[in-house]
Image (cartoon, rainbow, N blue to C red):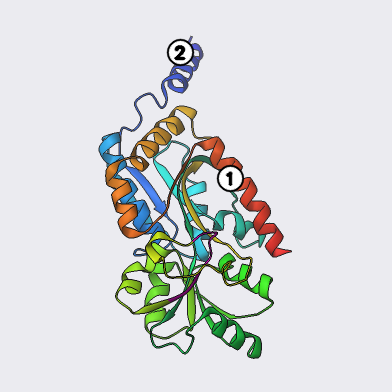
């Protein structure tokens, strides 16, 4: 009889699990340092979601390994929906390079929230006035020009190296929050980040933009040519999305997805993203999965 009662209790707990979710604080793991684009998008998303969910959504910055430390932590957390992770393109690239023990398959995908092209920046006093100035110098001085990388490997710069046949000296940092001051301090010759991560420095004149890695010019940088306009068939960028550990109950995923979708479509989020020059892109769990599968093919092609 005792075993039957325990079994019924287990069945009941499995059936009801997720029905009262969330009943406590949710931790949102950001795998990069505070101050960068991933951190900024996560904090804004969290501030809106917690109003909808009725529980605090707390940001946890877990840096290291170009995002591997934080994303590994998030993938191995309890499968109860109380630890969610903001995953980035590195969830594809790092495992391919054997630099991370986890892949996107270790997560249940919730939603994509952001998609941005990369912009190439130099400090205002840089000798490089144009993208061609930089490339011509790189051809003459292979692996000498210092590139401040937000992650290692950095697929923005690898796309340039692959297409043009140049090599830079990659200096790794933990996200744009560290790259921006490094470039301001002239510890590197150039960097590649999302436009929103450095728009303040761009508008203040501290940085010069030499090119945009997108198909079309950005509304916020109308005077800056794309690399395609310059004759280089190169596009690249970053994306950010929400995921939970593999095996998290569907009811929890559905609750989180609904909350993320509501947040992404809110005026508060749209105004913030537009003002900060971050691109908005919502995808459902299945759409997000297909997006990652296609992006994996792009990255594998670059690595070959």
Judging by the rendered image, the residue that carries numbered circle 1 is: 291
Residue at 37 percent across and 54 percent down: it is: 41
- Residue 124 sits above or below residue 105 on the image: below
Disc nearer the start of the sequence (1/2): 2
* Front-most of residues 26 and 114: 114
81 relative to 93 in the view: left or right: left
- Residue 107 sits above or below residue 206 on the image: above
Magenta-drawn segment:
209-216
* Percent position of residue 65, x then y: 52, 65
- Residue 146 sits above or below residue 200 on the image: below
| Residue 264 in which image quadrant | top left
* Percent position of residue 103, x then y: 60, 50
* Percent position of residue 220, x then y: 37, 62
- Residue 123 sits above or below residue 229 on the image: below
Judging by the rendered image, the residue that carries numbered circle 2 is: 5
Q: Secondary structure at mark 2?
A: helix
Residue at 53 percent across and 65 percent down: it is: 213
Outermost residue toward the right?
Answer: 304
* Percent position of residue 37, x then y: 39, 61
Cα gap from disc 1 to disc 2, whole angstroms: 45 Å
Image quadrant in which the C terminus is located? bottom right
Give me the disc on residue 117.
none
Residue at 41 percent across and 58 percent down: it is: 38
Tell me if I can see residue 98 in this picture.
yes
Q: Are marks 1 and 2 in contact (CB under 8 Å)?
A: no
Q: Disc 1 or disc 2, which is closer to the eye?
A: 1
167 relative to 66 in the view: left or right: right
């Amino acid at each position: 009889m005792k075993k039957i009662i325990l079994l019924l209790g287990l069945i009941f707990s499995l059936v009801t699990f997720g029905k009262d979710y969330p009943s406590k604080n949710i931790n949102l793991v950001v795998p990069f340092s505070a101050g960068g684009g991933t951190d900024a998008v996560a904090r804004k998303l969290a501030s809106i979601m917690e109003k909808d969910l009725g529980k605090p959504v707390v940001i946890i910055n877990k840096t290291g390994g170009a995002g591997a430390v934080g994303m590994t932590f998030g993938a191995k957390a309890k499968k109860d929906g109380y630890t969610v992770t903001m995953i980035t393109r590195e969830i594809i690239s790092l495992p391919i390079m054997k630099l991370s023990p986890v892949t996107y398959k270790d997560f249940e995908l919730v939603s994509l929230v952001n998609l941005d092209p990369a912009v190439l920046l130099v400090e205002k006093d840089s000798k490089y006035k144009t993208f061609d100035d930089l490339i011509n110098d790189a051809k003459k001085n292979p692996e000498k020009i210092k590139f401040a990388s937000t992650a290692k490997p950095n697929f923005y710069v690898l796309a340039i190296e692959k297409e043009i046949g140049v090599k830079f000296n990659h200096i790794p940092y933990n996200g744009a929050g560290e790259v921006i001051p490094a470039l301001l301090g002239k510890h590197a010759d150039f960097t590649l980040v999302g436009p929103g991560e450095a728009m303040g420095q761009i508008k203040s004149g501290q940085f010069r933009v030499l090119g945009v890695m997108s198909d079309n010019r950005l509304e916020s940088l109308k005077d800056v040519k794309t690399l395609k306009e310059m004759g280089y068939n190169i596009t690249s960028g970053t994306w950010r999305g929400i995921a939970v550990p593999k095996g998290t109950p569907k009811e929890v995923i559905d609750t989180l997805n609904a909350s993320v979708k509501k947040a992404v479509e809110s005026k508060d989020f749209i105004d913030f993203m537009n003002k900060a020059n971050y691109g908005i892109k919502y995808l459902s769990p299945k759409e997000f999965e297909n997006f990652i599968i296609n992006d994996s093919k792009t990255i594998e092609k670059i690595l070959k």
